Image (cartoon, rainbow, N blue to C red):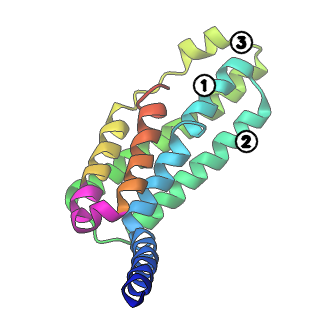
Amino acid sequence: GISLISQSRTNQVQGIWLEFESHRSDRLRALIALRSELGYGGMIHQFKNYILRQNQTDSKSIISSIGGAKAALVQYKYLQLNAAEKRAISHIETILDAYQTALNQMNQLILQQKTAKQIDHIVRIDDSDALEALKLLELETKLINSKTFEIQRRSLLLSSLRTAMGYGGLI
């Protein structure tokens, strides 16, 4: 009986500890926040919706997502970063600025009553550098957190799912 109680308490403590560890990685949280703001249901998704539907609600959502992504990048900047991570963050900031500029351009085109096809043809953004930057940040996060990788596996899988479904994936 005592062994069963001891095992139960040990499992309970282990569960609490694992939850604590999973919340401990600021780098991982920043990465997930960034992926969330950019990916499926985030800025890129809303950007495409705005081109198609030209609904001002989508425009406001894009601005909000850009702000959320920039906030996640600020979280990153407070971490100890290597040179590659600093470059990656710079690439992502550049693409966020490009999307902000494109959003302003889209607003003008919508006022000129351009069609979705015309807007899509005019507003082009090459975000391949930002996609590579996100991959690098994810790789660095996995390397740094390799000791706690198993503990954080669920969060990393969620981030990978967002990647597959969203920015750089299905979208």
Task: Tell me the element at label 1.
Answer: helix
Quadrant housing residue 131 = top left
Q: Nearer the viewer, mark 3 or mark 2?
A: 2
Q: Which mark is residue 48?
A: 1
Looking at the image, is mark 2 or mark 1 earlier in the sequence? 1
State yes or no: discs 3 and 2 in contact (Cβ < 8 Å): no
Task: Tell me the element at label 3.
Answer: loop
Q: Which mark is residue 60?
A: 2
Label 2 to label 1, Cα distance in Å?
13 Å
Looking at the image, is mark 3 or mark 1 earlier in the sequence? 1
Task: Tell me the element at label 2.
Answer: helix
Look at mark 3 in the image and give the residue it sits on: 114
Looking at the picture, which amino acid does disc 2 mark? Lys
Residue at 38% from the left image edge and 52% from the top image edge? 156
Q: Position of residue 145 (x, y in %)?
A: 27, 64
Q: Which residues are magenta?
A: 140-151
Looking at the image, is mark 3 or mark 2 earlier in the sequence? 2
Q: Is residue 25 above or below residue 65?
A: below
Looking at the picture, which amino acid does disc 1 mark? Lys
Q: Position of residue 168 (x, y in %)?
A: 41, 31
Q: Position of residue 79 (x, y in %)?
A: 34, 71
